[in-house]
Image (cartoon, grey):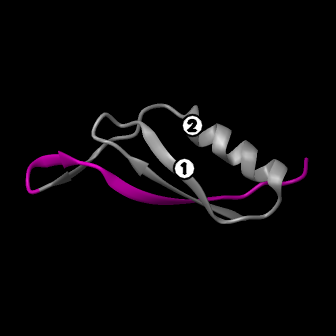
Amino acid sequence: MLMVKFVVNTEGKCTQIHMAKSVEYVLDEEARRVIENSPLWQPAVQNGRIVNAYRRQPITFSKQ
């Protein structure tokens, strides 16, 4: 399992993508690609305002 850290901006786009826990370069790059190409996320709301928010997303790869 690897852990991806990123920011969901006020438009719902994922930016500043970093690997918090790495497994292997190839898997890290695939996880980055998946997060970059994911649909828009719902932005965070704080005190009634839409704000940028940090997220940590675990990703597990399995053999098929």
Q: Residue at x 68, y 47 (%)?
A: 31
| Nearer the camera: disc 2 or disc 1 | 1
Disc 1: which residue: 17
Which label was assigned to residue 36? 2
Tag 2 and tag 1, C-beta contact below 8 Å: yes
Magenta region, residue range: 47-64
| Amino acid identity at mark 1 | Ile
| Amino acid identity at mark 2 | Glu
Residue 62 location, quadrant: bottom right
Confirm whether the magenta stretch covers residue 6: no
Q: How much space separates mark 2 and mark 1, taking CA atoms?
A: 8 Å
Q: Residue at x 12, y 47 (%)?
A: 49
The local crowd at label 2, few if under 14, some if 14 to 19, many if 20 or more residues have their Cα within 10 Å, is some
Q: Residue at x 83, y 48 (%)?
A: 26
Picture layout, residue 59 above or below residue 31: below
Considering only order in the chain, which callout, 1 or 2, is on the residue closer to the N terminus? 1
Q: Residue at x 66, y 38 (%)?
A: 33
Numbered circles on residues, count = 2
